[in-house]
Amino acid sequence: MLSRREVLLGGAAGWLGAAAPAFADAEPLTQLPGKRPLIQRAYRPPNFETPLSELAASYTPNDVFFVRYHLAVIPWVDTHSWRVTVGGDSATHPLRLSLHDLQHGFERVSLAAVNQCSGNRRGLFTPRVPGVQWQNGAMGNALWSGVRLRDVLRRAGIRPDAVEVVVQGADSAVLPSTPKFVKSLPLERALDDSTLIAFEMNGAPLPHWNGAPARLIVPGWTGTYWMKHLTDIQLVPKPFDGFWMKAAYRLPTGAFPGARFATQENADTTPITEILVNSLILAPLEGQRLPQGQKALLRGKAWDNGAGIAAVEVSSDAGQHWRPATLGRDLGRYAWRDFHLPLDTAQRGALTLAVRARSRNGAQQPQKLTFNPSGYHDNVVQTVSVEIV
Amino acid sequence: MSGAARRAALLGLVLTVPALADTAPQQVTELAAGPGHDLTVGRCIVCHSLEYIPANAPAMNRGAWQKTIQKMREKFGAPITDAEAAQILDYLAAHYAGKP
């Protein structure tokens, strides 16, 4: 008989060590208020993953969109009394804005964008690394509506010495000794016309668990910068030195492509920035048995940092030959792109399918994982094994 | 209870308790019995629920747990004394170290 320890370890390894699709039904599902059942990675602070079966829609519904928090004190923010302050040492005219001010004082902008957690797929890393053991569902695509951060910063007056924009939200830690979750952006990224303060998601007010009443949208960059429950925005003349910039969300310097965050980089490590070109197979599922001679469709999503998806290719011979999949509607360069390809089911037997996406900037998904100790940027080519029966 | 939850409960992995009305039950993790259990639960649960411990076990060995406990104390300000840290480390290394 197994000891309790063996059961615990075996259980954890069984859930998390295997390919996601085959084990999708073994995930513990929990329902947060206002959400449908999601995969519970942690209850407190809440970290809930979207099941693979809920990622098929072009726009991920608000009630299944993933939930990610670092700290456990999460107030239900009152929309009417909520204010965001915009100031800092490099602002000439500090502001305090209500939701009404944002909605009526600035040009309204909508864009579709993938929100992907930096640690999405960490649970698929080999060797295993500590952290929330996400599989494929710490991501989603939504239509975000709000105002440009640039317009708000300009209203607050940007001094020429500004180098970063520091943002924080209403959520906080249990202990006063725990560093508040505060992030910064390079000034040029904050001023990019795609960087938004959003108050709507898929046409509805931003849900509580996704940052109500307003959050930052940084299309093409990983979710760590997308501050929820935004309360404070500061223009600053020197690099922000908080824990969540200096000690977390960092990669080995030079190991990955993508925008550089120069004011936060050192010789050893650099902040994670842009999403890498990637794809996700939604069908068929791992281990699925497909009837011989019947129609079957491979389908999924591909996305990148906003350069836009140029092509998605499929191989059924371990990468020797690649066939182009058909791309779905272009929802905008920061959105994900559907792809599909009919499968040849004429011959019985095992079939392993590999999918790789290529970006318009030439970047392509790699075959081999670039290991990093925090488990970020897993964009290796995924495979799915099926049987034609 | 879902099939998955039932299987997990049968394995002794989780205990389901009623959460907020109109929501599916919260999945509550129970840690393995043994010396240091109560202290570990008592200190860790101040800031986070306990799933993190079994979920991370495959990535952890004694050295990794030592680093994590140090990070919780020094970076996150967890009020844990040296003597308590030693007991918590022994407990986690005995029950949740799945990495060679």
Image (cartoon, coloured by chain):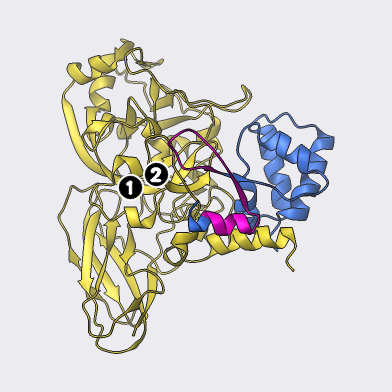
Chain colours: A yellow, B blue
Pick whichever, B79 or A73, lies toward us.
A73
Mark 2 residue element: loop
Pick whichever, B63 or A34, lies toward us.
A34
Q: Which residue is mark 1?
A: A140
Q: Residues within 10 Å of mark 2 (few under 14, many from 20)?
A: many
Pick whichever, B67 or A347, lies toward us.
A347
Q: Which residue is mark 2?
A: A66
Q: Which residues are magenta?
A: B5-26
Q: Chain of mark 2?
A: A
Callouts 1 and 2 on one subunit: yes
Contact between marks 1 and 2 (CB within 8 A): the answer is yes
Residue type pointed to by label 1: Gly
Residue shown at the point (52%, 25%) measured from the top left: A172
Residue B16, picture quadrant = top right
- Residue B14 seen from this side: yes
Q: Position of residue A145 (x, y in %)?
A: 22, 32
Residue type pointed to by label 2: Phe
